[in-house]
Image: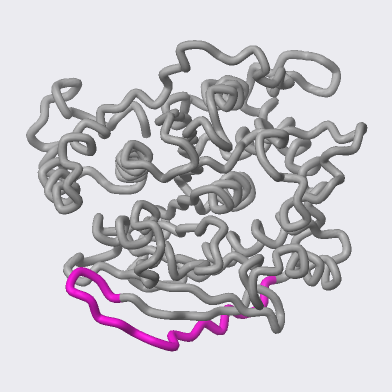
Amino acid sequence: MMRRAIAGLLLFGLGSLFAGAGNQDWQQPPARVPANAPQLSRLLVDEHGRRIASKRGWRQQRALLQAQWQAVLGEFPAAKPPLRSQVLGTEELPEFTRQYATYQVEEGVFTDGYLLTPRAAKGRLPAVVVFHPTTPLQAKGVAGLAAEYDREKWQGVQLVQRGYIVWCPRNYIETAGTNWAGNAARVRARHPRWTGMTRMVWDAIRAADFVTSLPRVDRKRLGCLGHSLGGKEVLFAMAFEPRYRAGVSSEGGIGLKFSNWEAPWYFGRQIQQPGFQRENHEVLALAAPRAFLLLAGDSADDDRSWEFIQAARPVYELLGAARNLGWLNHHQGHRYAPEARAAAEAFLDQHLKPRPREHFDRAPPGGKGGGRSSGR
């Protein structure tokens, strides 16, 4: 597996950086937590102030937190309409096939995007949904269809070249032009109790429906990755769709005051009201025990974001999955920098790719490379 990973990384001229990423300690704290870091509520305390020390107690607390966040989002549709998916175009490239496809997210409402499938790989494959950042190029950018788009953020192409089936859907805010507030207003006209973020969560759920309907996808090995706008979507996708087994959120600004969560295409100004008591460490905890990596760059996310990891860690520890929660600050600004990419790909490989059978057969238990990684 390591030889294959290194070979793929050398293709991009980043071999030395990427080769060491698999040994990354995803839980190194920052040298100093900033004085203005948020003070977050404890998650393992029930409504009566009693400490939660059992998995059963956490399940009850989790149900409460999920209901509280569902009240913010509004209820999802009671029933899912048929996908009615269609492939409208196919492009054969040397390493992968790229298809333009559509499917139905709500009755009469369709989305579109690009499906990337490795050409050489055999059998059922892990899959990743790549949520694109804010750009008028929408999913074309991450799918490698726009030469003018920053190649650092061609995440869809990068992942398909690593052997993943990749779905790159369009975010609803980039529908019918770039009038993001107008697109959010159309969502609320259809669903008065929804926020713009609710539409993103529902779209992430339907993306999982679409990807897991594909015959070559291993349904138990589905992940998601996103940068900026897409990083926000990853956080809530992980919280509300359990089929996502691993997620990487890059520079989304995890704190509700870290970036523009109050924008109408996210939550609107309700989150700035004096009585609003929710914060996103609760959302992160809803993803536990599934794997989550937060990538910071000292822009939307910085060393303050470590406090969200710390706040959710006790939940992961209670569930026996402390190593599934990670973070990295690459200090490269609002970029999907080489360090971010190396970390994201190593993390997804660790949690979504099975280790070769011969690896288990030959390595002694507990020896070098033996057994299953503690990070799973």
- Kindly identify the residue that appears in the image at 46 percent across and 58 percent down: 130
- Magenta run includes residue 83: yes
Residue 128, position in %: x, y? 41, 57
Residue that lies at the very extreme toward the bottom in this rendered image? 88
Q: Name above or below for residue 2 compared with residue 298.
A: below
**In what quadrant of the picture does the N terminus appear?**
top left
Most foreground residue, 180 or 209: 180
Most foreground residue, 319 or 90: 90
**In what quadrant of the picture does the C terminus appear?**
top left
- Kindly identify the residue that appears in the image at 86 percent across and 45 percent down: 270
Most foreground residue, 163 or 61: 163
Q: Does residue 44 show up?
A: yes
- Kindly identify the residue that appears in the image at 59 percent across and 23 percent down: 304
- Kindly identify the residue that appears in the image at 25 percent across and 71 percent down: 96
Residue 328 in the figure: left or right of residue 5:
right
Residue 62, position in %: x, y? 70, 35
Q: How many marks?
A: 0
Q: Name above or below for residue 216 compared with residue 372.
A: below
Residue that lies at the very extreme toward the left in this rendered image? 362
Residue 124, position in %: x, y? 29, 64
Residue 359, position in %: x, y? 13, 38
Q: Does residue 71 show up?
A: no
Most foreground residue, 252 or 40: 252
Q: Which residues are magenta?
A: 80-97
Instruction: Say how the picture is coloured.
Output: one colour
- Magenta run includes residue 21: no
